[in-house]
Image: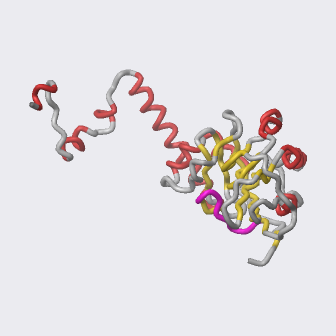
Amino acid sequence: MKPVVVRRIARADGETIRLLGELGVATVHEAQGRRGLMRPYMRPVYPSARLSGSAVTVWCQPGDNLMIHAAMEVVAPGDVLVVATTSESDDGMFGELLGESCRAHGVVGLAIDAGVRDTSELTAMNFPVWAKAISAQGTVKATAGCVNVEVVCAGALVRPGDVIVGDRDGVVVVPRQAAVEVARLGGERRAKEERSRARLKSGELGLDMYGLRGKLAELGVEWVESEESLR
């Protein structure tokens, strides 16, 4: 791929992004047909980290963060940096200083399929980061890559302007064109879960609430009174 930095991208509207962030990763993932989830090794650097924003994608060489610096010229407030590498890497490609630069330009977080460092400082800044690894291994700024092109980050396809949602459950990608519908479906799912929660708290069994007794019978499960009945 020819090295390129795309300056302008389309983004979802702010209210939709906010709603998706409120719904959280698990609900959004379910609402869009269990798609878009990044690999479970993508963990937040501090447990309370949350984010939702528009993806600015960065494609780097392993151990080289040059293109992250290039991306800072084209970000907008509310964006999330999504960094992928041309081959596997766990080098510490992002740290406190890049975090400060992100904050200055309104970037609300980072998802990187590689390593990060300075996690204590990033935590103190309340700058939300999801990464494959934590590593103090240094990096260089030597090789060209791309900004705002389609990438695969931690197994998930990400296009510039897609909505990124992150919390303790991981990171999920919502295609920009589907964001409004996914937010609607997620809201319906949240309301349904609230009703189910109330029923379960009252003591109702999931077997009855979800109609699972017939499924168990179909699978040949029998109920017996005691272990002795099996002898």
Residue furthest to the front in view is 137
Which residue is at 10% across, 28% downward?
229
Which residue is at 44% across, 29% downward?
197
User: What span is colored magenta in the figure?
Assistant: 148-155
186 drawn magenta: no
Q: In which quadrant of the rendered view does residue 149 lie?
A: bottom right
Q: Main secondary structure of the magenta part?
A: loop
Compare residues 144 and 165 and report the one nearer the observer.
144
Residue furthest to the top in view is 202
Residue 49 image point, x, y percent: 70, 37
| Quadrant in the picture for the N terminus | bottom right
Looking at the image, residue 86 sits to the left or right of residue 198; the answer is right
Q: Is residue 229 above or below residue 106?
A: above
Looking at the image, residue 155 sits to the left or right of residue 138; the answer is left
Q: Is residue 50 above or below residue 115?
A: above
Q: In which quadrant of the rendered view does residue 143 lie?
A: bottom right
Which residue is at 81% across, 61% downward?
64
Q: Is residue 23 visible?
A: yes
Residue furthest to the bottom in view is 2
Residue 91 image point, x, y percent: 75, 54
Compare residues 220 and 178 and report the one nearer the observer.
220
| Quadrant in the picture for the C terminus | top left
Looking at the image, residue 213 sits to the left or right of residue 200; the answer is left
In this figure, what is the number of numbered marks?
0
Q: What colouring style does the render use?
A: secondary structure
Looking at the image, residue 63 sits to the left or right of residue 179; the answer is right
Q: Is residue 17 visible?
A: no
Residue 157 image point, x, y percent: 61, 63
Residue 69 image point, x, y percent: 87, 58
Which residue is at 87% across, 62% downward?
141
Q: Is residue 85 above or below residue 230?
A: below
